[in-house]
Image (cartoon, rainbow, N blue to C red):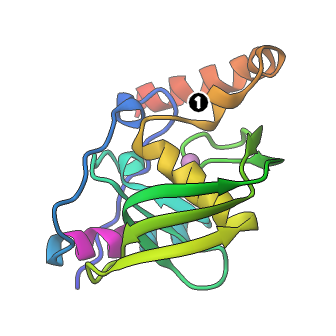
Amino acid sequence: MTTIKLKIRLYGDPCLRKKSIPVPEVGPPERALIQSMMATMHEHKGIGLAAPQVCIHQRIFVADIGEGPLAFVNPKIIRYFGSGVLEEGCLSIPGVTVMVRRPEKIVVRYLDEHNQPVEKACEALLARVIQHETDHLDGRLIVDYAGFKERIKLRKQLKAIQESQEMQ
Ligand code: NI
């Protein structure tokens, strides 16, 4: 399988705000994309990467919190438990972190890279990543969670990322 190098889109790129559509079936083209996304995520030392971050608007993301790579297709979070605040970063918004409140435990339903339906209960970091990446599929970013004061503080940083993105 050939792994294609994918370009990660940065804050300000309209690709990041577009909603992704469900995948009818996980076949060879989707598996190739998953492979390339995993390679791209690992290359950038990320723990998650969603398809819209490489400007592909299919409901696919990959994650690896150090326990091996996982692929999630058409993820749907069906149950939520608890709530906690944690600092999150994003490969599309380098250098920026935002404190985000999210449920701590979730149950997610998805297709894996072999088109098999999976239902998985997750907590801690993996539950975080799954929610963060699912947000990407709906065009939502961590900066959207920033409060008014935090947003003002981030303004300069975001502007710099946006400008570097526009020059590419
Ligand atoms: Ni992200």
Indicate the position of residue 61 as horizontal and vertical percent values.
Answer: 42, 61
10 Å neighbourhood of mark 1: few (<14), some, or many (≥20)? Answer: some
Q: Is residue 85 above or below residue 145?
A: below
Indicate the position of residue 163 as horizontal and vertical percent values.
Answer: 52, 23
Q: Is ligand 1 less than 8 Å from the beta carbon at label 1?
A: no
Horizontal side of residue 100 vs 15, given as left or right: right
Horizontal side of residue 112 vs 81, given as left or right: left
Q: Amino acid at mark 1?
A: Ile
In the picture of the structure, the residue carrying the numbered disc 1 is 161
Residue 166: which quarter of the image? top left
Q: How many marks?
A: 1
Residue 130: which quarter of the image? bottom right
Q: Where is the C terminus found, in terms of image quarters?
A: top left
Residue placed at 77% from the left, 14% from the top?
148
Horizontal side of residue 57 vs 12, given as left or right: left
Q: Is residue 44 visible?
A: no
Residue placed at 25% from the left, 46% from the top?
21
Q: Which residues are magenta?
A: 30-37
Secondary structure mainly formed by the magenta segment = helix
